[in-house]
């Protein structure tokens, strides 16, 4: 049974950081979910360890040392410096089964604390999203579709290693231009969405405007460097994107949003900017300390869209 551990040996200490309407706890999310009040969370927005292995202690130590392990520096497409990315294509059959087991147990623990009709937004990637979705359905959550974050990353598009000149017109995988966010919901307890909204404040998604519903496709960009510098985490998501999810997740504009894999606190920063309550758990003291300064700074920022990249050659 896989149990995520921080980069250094860690026993939960009860440490927490409070800022505005946000509360971040240094804790294992399974421990917190086991003690939390049932039916208390209105929504979840989280970016979990996609393949689990990339956040094992030895892999995190290699990442922070800048060498080896599942993390790699992707090839340069335009001469720019690239950040490390985990290689999910190297997961073994046992590691894939461990991923399904982990997220099934996590989904079951999460379901208990969610209000009926609460939505769950979970970041994933095209290679592993089927496993995550299967696990959460096994846990008893309703699949409600997928949010497509349009963002051109530097994953994929590589020529065959060691034979780049020989096979100039060949790529081993498609170049990634999108990021999937799985969307799930705890079943309604009332007969209709309107009754559930009146009783629990959950069940739907907040519209963008009177004319436009919330869309399952969001034009995005890579995370601006200024945000990466404040929230130093290998998978930090941009505020301009997270703030849209925060708004959509609370259909009546009020409630509590949970991020069980809080990392450097970007979801809580988006919650604070929106003026809604957020709770986060992070097991790694390294990222917990970063979040203590990142949350206030990010929450106060005007979130720039960042540098959009063309999705087609020449555009």
Image (cartoon, rainbow, N blue to C red):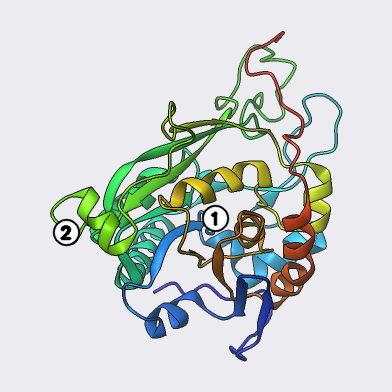
Residue 94 showing in the rendered view: yes
The residue labelled by disc 2 is 190
219 up-or-down from 102: above or below: above
x 61%, y 59%: residue? 275
Q: CA distance from mark 1 to mark 2?
A: 30 Å
90 up-or-down from 53: above or below: above
Where residue 310 appears, x then y in whole percent? 68, 18
The residue labelled by disc 1 is 47
Q: Nearer the viewer, mark 1 or mark 2?
A: 2
Say which quarter of the image contains residue 116.
Answer: bottom left
Reading the chain from its start, which is encountered first: label 1 or label 2? 1
Out of 21 and 84, give the one closest to the viewer.
21
Q: Which mark is residue 120?
A: none
Where residue 268 appears, x then y in whole percent? 62, 62
CB contact under 8 Å: marks 1 and 2: no
190 up-or-down from 207: above or below: below
Q: Residue furthest top?
A: 314
**Judging from the image, what secondary structure is the residue with disc 2 in?**
loop
Say which quarter of the image contains residue 65.
Answer: bottom right
Where residue 261 appears, x then y in whole percent? 55, 65
């Amino acid at each position: 049974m896989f149990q995520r551990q921080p980069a250094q040996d860690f026993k939960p200490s009860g440490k927490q950081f409070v800022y505005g309407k946000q509360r971040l706890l240094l804790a294992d999310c399974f421990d917190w979910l086991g003690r939390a009040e049932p039916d208390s969370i209105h929504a979840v927005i989280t970016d979990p360890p996609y393949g689990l292995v990339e956040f094992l202690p030895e892999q995190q130590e290699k990442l922070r040392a800048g060498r080896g392990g599942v993390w790699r520096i992707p090839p340069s497409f335009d001469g720019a410096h690239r950040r490390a990315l985990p290689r999910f294509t190297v997961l073994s059959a046992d590691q894939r089964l461990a991923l399904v087991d982990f997220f099934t147990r996590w989904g079951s623990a999460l379901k208990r604390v969610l209000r009926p009709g609460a939505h769950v937004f979970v970041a994933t990637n095209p290679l592993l999203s089927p496993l995550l979705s299967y696990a959460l359905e096994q846990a008893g959550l309703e699949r409600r579709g997928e949010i497509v974050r349009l963002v051109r990353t530097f994953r994929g598009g590589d020529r065959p290693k060691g034979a780049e000149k020989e096979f100039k017109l060949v790529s081993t995988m498609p170049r990634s231009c999108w990021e999937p966010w799985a969307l799930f919901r705890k079943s309604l307890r009332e007969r209709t969405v309107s009754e559930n909204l009146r009783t629990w404040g959950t069940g739907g998604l907040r519209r963008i405007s009177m004319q436009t519903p919330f869309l399952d496709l969001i034009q995005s960009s890579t995370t601006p460097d200024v945000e990466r510098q404040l929230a130093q985490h290998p998978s930090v998501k941009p505020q301009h994107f997270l703030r849209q999810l925060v708004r959509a997740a609370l259909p009546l504009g009020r409630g509590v949003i949970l991020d069980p894999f809080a990392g450097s606190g970007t979801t809580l920063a988006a919650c604070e900017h929106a003026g809604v309550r957020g709770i986060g758990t992070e097991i790694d003291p390294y990222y917990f300390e970063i979040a203590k300064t990142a949350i206030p700074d990010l929450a106060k920022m005007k979130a720039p869209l960042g540098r959009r990249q063309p999705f087609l050659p020449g555009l």
